[in-house]
């Protein structure tokens, strides 16, 4: 395997045999990237199109981002697809989002398998139509034995709801005697979250410029590096992903300590 001369770090090669990010050694790349994919509606409105066209175009950005993360050897990618607060939107927009989800699960299955991607879904199942859940489960089951990049889709996800669900399960286990309160530590709490077993996000990307977290991965992002771009999600491409990773690679992560 070729090596970066400066760092002597093995470089992951993309399909064409050329590393897409040769200036960022593997050891400086984030293990886990989380993305708040925002701005579909604004992008569409600027083009004089209905909001749903923004969501449709957003799927292309999802495809490109997933593919590039797999090529770069990123271990985990988590995409915020639908928040638990997004149910406040008009029924027709929600219906279209459900249709897109179903279509994605069906149409991307072969690509997911070819790219050796493992799919996981986090969030509450309530409100997701049965037929969409079935397609989600098929993709999860089919990709379960893959060994490449792990793609986690946050659907009907809320960070606070996730904590409520975790606390309920912890309380149940304490009540049944399986867990003692004094034994609960940060690792215990993490193991009761939807993201149990996943590394915390190293890099959190948000498109469309808002400087907020919008209830995404509240526990897990405690030390994530944030990168916000004014580009809307349908405009987000490989170039922007590389820019975010380069920015991440240049940061000094201190975790409360000293450099
Ligand atoms: C993000 O784009 C997609 C979802 C939240 C489902 P938006 O639909 O929030 O687009 P804006 O923020 O209104 O432009
Ligand atoms: C966050 O975007 C949720 C997703 C990207 C799925 P929103 O558009 O819902 O966030 P707010 O309402 O601007 O905070
Ligand atoms: Mg938005």
Image: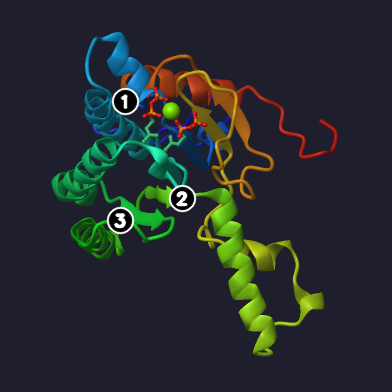
- In the image shown, does 8 or 128 lie closer to the viewer? 128
Dot label at residue 41: none
| Disc number for residue 128 | 3
Of marks 2 and 3, which one's residue comes earlier in the chain? 3
**Location of residue 83 in the rendering, given as x and y in whole percent from the top left corner:** 44, 44
In this rendering, the answer to whether 97 lies above or below 239 is: below
Q: Position of residue 53 (x, y in %)?
A: 22, 24
- 156 left or right of 17? right
From the image, state whether disc 1 or disc 3 is nearer to you.
3
Residues packed near mark 2 inside 10 Å, few (<14), some (14 to 19) or many (20 plus):
many
Q: Which residue is mark 2?
A: 157
Give the mark nearest the N terminus, 2 or 1. Answer: 1
Splitting the image into four quadrants, where does ligand 1 fall? top left
Residue found at x 57% / y 21%: 247
Which residue is located at x 20 percent, y 49 percent? 102
Q: Which residue is mark 1?
A: 18
Give the secondary structure at mark 3: loop
Location of the C terminus (image quadrant): top right
Task: Rate crowding at label 3 as few (under 14), some (14 to 19) or many (20 or more) other CA atoms within 10 Å.
Answer: some
**C-alpha gap between disc 1 and disc 3:** 41 Å
Mark closest to the chain's N terminus, 1 or 3: 1
Q: Residues within 10 Å of mark 1 (few under 14, many from 20)?
A: few
């Amino acid at each position: 395997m070729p090596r970066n001369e400066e760092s002597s770090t093995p470089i992951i090669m993309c399909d064409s045999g050329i590393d897409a990010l040769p200036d960022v050694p593997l050891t400086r790349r984030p293990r886990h990237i989380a993305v708040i994919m925002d701005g579909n509606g604004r992008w569409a409105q600027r083009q004089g199109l209905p909001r749903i066209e923004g969501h449709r175009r957003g799927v292309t950005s999802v495809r490109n981002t997933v593919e590039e993360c797999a090529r770069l050897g990123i271990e985990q990618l988590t995409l915020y697809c639908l928040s638990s607060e997004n149910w406040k939107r008009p029924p027709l927009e929600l219906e279209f989002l459900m249709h897109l989800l179903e279509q994605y699960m069906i149409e991307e299955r072969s690509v997911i398998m070819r790219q050796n991607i493992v799919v996981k879904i986090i969030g509450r199942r309530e409100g997701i139509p049965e037929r969409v859940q079935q397609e989600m489960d098929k993709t999860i089951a089919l990709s379960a034995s893959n060994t490449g990049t792990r793609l986690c889709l946050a659907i009907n996800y809320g960070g606070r709801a996730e904590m409520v669900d975790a606390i309920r399960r912890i309380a149940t286990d304490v009540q049944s005697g399986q867990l003692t309160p004094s034994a609960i530590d940060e690792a215990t709490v993490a193991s009761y979250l939807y993201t149990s077993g996943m590394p915390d996000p190293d890099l959190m990307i948000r498109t469309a410029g808002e400087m907020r977290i919008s209830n995404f991965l509240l526990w897990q992002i405690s030390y994530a590096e944030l990168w916000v771009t004014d580009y809307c999600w349908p405009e987000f491409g490989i170039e922007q992903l590389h820019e975010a990773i380069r920015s991440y690679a240049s940061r000094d992560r201190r975790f409360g300590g000293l450099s």
